Amino acid sequence: MNNQRIQDYINNRLSPAETQNFKEEMSQNPSLQKETEALQAFRKAIRSAGLAEPVPNLQPMLADIARPSRTSWFQKFAPAAIACVAIFGIGVAVNRAVTDQTTPIVASAKPLPEAAHLYKKSPQIMSWQGSDPKEAAAHIAKKFKDPFPTLINMTGAEITGAECGHCWIAYDLKHNGQAYTLYGRKESGNIDQGTPQPYGDHLLYKFQDGIGWYDKGGMTYVLVGGTAEGRYALACKASKCTTKLN
Amino acid sequence: MSGELPVLYRVAKRLGCGNEEAEDLVQTCLIKAYRAWDRFDGNHLRSWLIKILRNERLMVLRSHKEALSLEEHEEIEVIQEGFWSELAGKLEVERIIAAMEQLSPAYRMTIHLCDVEELTYEEAAEIMDIPIGTVRSRLSRARQTLRDILLAEAQMEAAR
C-alpha cells in the first residue's frame, strides 16, 4: 500500500483524474478505504488537538503596536521653543561670563554617544545652571510644558547633572560602580531602529552602545555607559519610573 | 489582523516557546510586521506573519546554536495493512499534544502548519523556505513519526 499516495489524496494533492482513480481503487479495496479513513480521522484529531490549546487574550498587543505615532514635539512647539531657547541661551551665556556655576544639567558641549546621535536632529539649545536635579527638572518641565523625571531615589543610583547636546536633558548616574548617562528628549519614533525587547507594559530598544525607551507622554530616553547587562538592568528600573510620569 | 493572533501564538508554541515566550514572540512579530507593512504585498497575510514569526524564532535559536535542520527522505514508502487504522481509539487531545512535543522542530512545524492551521503546501513551503516537494515528504514523515510515538505510548501503557 503506497503511503504517500494515501497522504496525497488526504491532502488534496492528486489531480482530478488521479483522485477519481484512487476512489475507484478504494471502492474495490476495503483495506485501502479503511486506511484512508483512519488517516483522515488522524488528521482531524491533530487539528482538534492543536486548536484545543488555550490562547491568551492578545488583542491589547495590537492596540499598543498600532497606536498612531505621536506628533513630534518640535512640530508642535518649534516656534515658541526657538524663541524661548534663544532668550534663555543669551541668559546662560551672560550668566556663565559673570559667574562660575556648578555643573549644568543640559548644555551643548560634549559630543553625544553613538546611540544618542540617532535622535539628534534639531539645533535648539535648552540650558540650566544649577546642581539640584529636582530644581532643574522642574524648570525644564515648565519650559517644555511636560514632566521630566529626576529619577532620584527611584533606581538606587547616584545622580548628578550631565552635559549633553541639543534639546536633551541628561543625568549622570553611578550604579553598582559603573558610570551611565541617561538622555531624554521630547520626541518619539527614532529609537525604533534598535532591537525591541518587551519589558512590562512597554518596550526597551537595544543598541550597540545604549538602550532606549519611550514614556507615555512622548519622551524618548536613551541610557548609555556601563556594561550591556548593567544598562539593561538600570533601563528596566528607570523605564518603570518614566512610564509612570504621564 | 486580530484573527491571526491565536494562529501566531499556536505556531510560537509549536516552535518550542513557553507561554510567556510565545506572547513575547508574537509581540515582536507584530512590531516587525507593523514596520514592514509597506513591503507586504497584500496576499496571504497569515503566511507572511508566520514567516516573520518563524524567522524571529530562528534568530533566537541560532544564537543558542539550535538549528531546525533535518535530513529529508524522498523514497516511496510502502506501509502494511492496518498502519493507520491501528491508531483508532488512541487519539485523545492531550496525548496528541504531548506526542507533537516529541517531534523534531521541523516535523512539528510542518504538521502544525499543514494539519492544524490547514495551510497549503505552497504557503508552508514559503514560510519554511523549503521546496514544495520537501513539505510533502516532511508532512508524510511527520505524521508517521507522530503515529509511531502515539502507538508506542499506548503499547507501554497497556503493558503496565
Image (spheres, coloured by chain):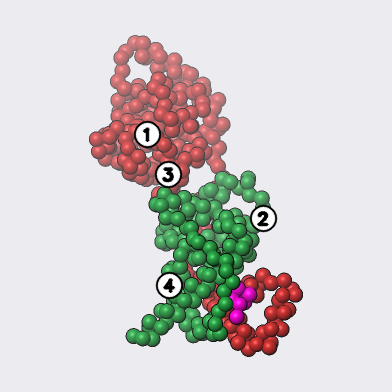
Chain colours: A red, B green
Q: Residues within 10 Å of mark 4 (few under 14, many from 20)?
A: some
Q: Mark 1 points at which residue?
A: A224
Q: How far apart are marks 1 and 3 (CA)?
A: 13 Å
Q: Is residue B18 above or below residue A180?
A: below
Q: Which chain carries label 4?
A: B
Q: Which chain carries label 1?
A: A
Q: Could you tell me the amino acid type at mark 1?
A: Val
Q: Name the magenta segment's main secondary structure.
A: helix
Camera-near label (4 vs 2) is 4
Q: Do the residues labelled 4 and 2 touch (CB within 8 Å)?
A: no
Residue farthest right in this picture: A17
Q: Distance between the residues labelled 1 and 4?
A: 45 Å
**The residue tagged with tag 2: helix, strand or loop?**
loop
Q: How crowded is mark 2: few (under 14 residues within 10 Å), some or many (20 or more)?
A: few
Where residue B33 sits: x, y (%)?
56, 50
Q: Name the residue under label 3.
A: A204
Q: Mark 4 points at which residue?
A: B98
**The residue tagged with tag 4: helix, strand or loop?**
helix
Q: Which residue is drawn at 44% across and 61% down?
A: B16
Camera-near label (1 vs 2) is 2
Q: Could you tell me the amino acid type at mark 2?
A: Asn
For the residues tagged 1 and 4, is the chain the same?
no
Where residue A128 sits: x, y (%)?
38, 23
**The residue tagged with tag 3: helix, strand or loop?**
strand
Q: How far apart are marks 4 and 3 (CA)?
A: 35 Å
Q: Mark 2 lies on which chain?
A: B
Camera-near label (3 vs 2) is 2
Q: Could you tell me the amino acid type at mark 3?
A: Leu
Boundaries of the magenta span: A1-6
Q: Do the residues labelled 3 and 2 touch (CB within 8 Å)?
A: no
Q: In which quarter of the image is residue A213?
A: top left
Which of the image's four quarters has the C terminus of chain A? top left
